[in-house]
Amino acid sequence: MHFLITAGPTREPIDPVRYLSNRSSGKMGYAIAEAALEAGHQVTLLSGPVVISAPEGATLIRVETAKEMYDAVSECIPGCDVAVFCAAVADYRVETVAGEKIKKLADRLTLTLVKNPDILGSARSVFGFGGILVGFAAETTDLARHAVEKLERKQCDLLVANDVSRTDIAFDREVNEVTLFFRNGSQENLPLSSKREIAHTLITRIESLR
Ligand code: CTP
């Protein structure tokens, strides 16, 4: 199958030298790309700025902003059988990006943020994607309730939920612990293990949804 995988954070510029972003390292998305390749699949990896290198054999497309990621997904998704949205897309961007570096003249500075397009949420409704759709959810409270709600709202086949209130897993760690929520209502906990192991299990579960 041909996998489209989004990974890493996005960067939303404030001025030529500053940006808004988040703590995503890209490790989970890159591990999924590697596991898919090892299982014999074709992979297009659409990545925000990260320091890790892409697995050999993946087609890597680099983007910075959510808008660039949205455009790249809209271009690539028609040729794919599976789309895994692992990227930590910035929900908001600065409304007016300053053309010059902002000088510290005022004591207070207000940035107006506007909502970015929801890429995963557009997969079915805007891009008309009919393949296997996998989303991620980073939650700090009511994990199951939020995950099931997100799975339905974004019309996913599978949603991978992360408890980001825990400092021992997820952001920038080598290990993770996730719960999988399937469209048929079933769920499965993948106990604490390396992101590599989690990625392999995830690929197996995706293959069984085919
Ligand atoms: N996502 C996306 N585009 C966005 C925001 C999120 O594709 N602009 C994707 C992420 O890659 C992830 C999923 O949506 O697969 C969950 O994102 P999240 O931000 O947790 O969900 P939201 O629906 O934005 O809900 P909230 O921020 O209110 O929790």
Image (cartoon, helix red, strand yellow):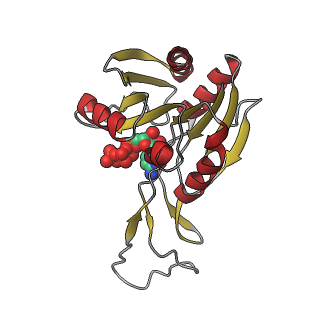
Question: Viewed as shown, does residue 193 lie left or right of 46?
Answer: left
Q: Nearer the viewer, residue 33 or 109?
A: 33
Q: Quadrant of the N terminus?
A: top right
Q: Is residue 189 above or below residue 60?
A: above
Task: Name which residue lies at 45% across and 36% down.
Answer: 171
Task: Name which residue lies at 45% across and 68% down.
Answer: 94
Q: Is residue 42 above or below residue 207?
A: below
Does residue 48 appear anywhere in the picture? no
Residue 173 percent location from the top left of the image? 49, 30
Q: Is residue 159 above or below residue 25?
A: above
The image quadrant that residue 41 belongs to is top right
Q: Is residue 204 above or below residue 101?
A: above
Task: Name which residue lies at 48% across and 54% down.
Answer: 21
Residue 2 percent location from the top left of the image? 67, 29
Q: Nearer the viewer, residue 109 or 123?
A: 123
Residue 142 percent location from the top left of the image? 22, 33
Does residue 82 appear anywhere in the picture? yes
Question: Viewed as shown, does residue 91 lie left or right of 128?
Answer: left
Quadrant for ligand 1 reads: top left
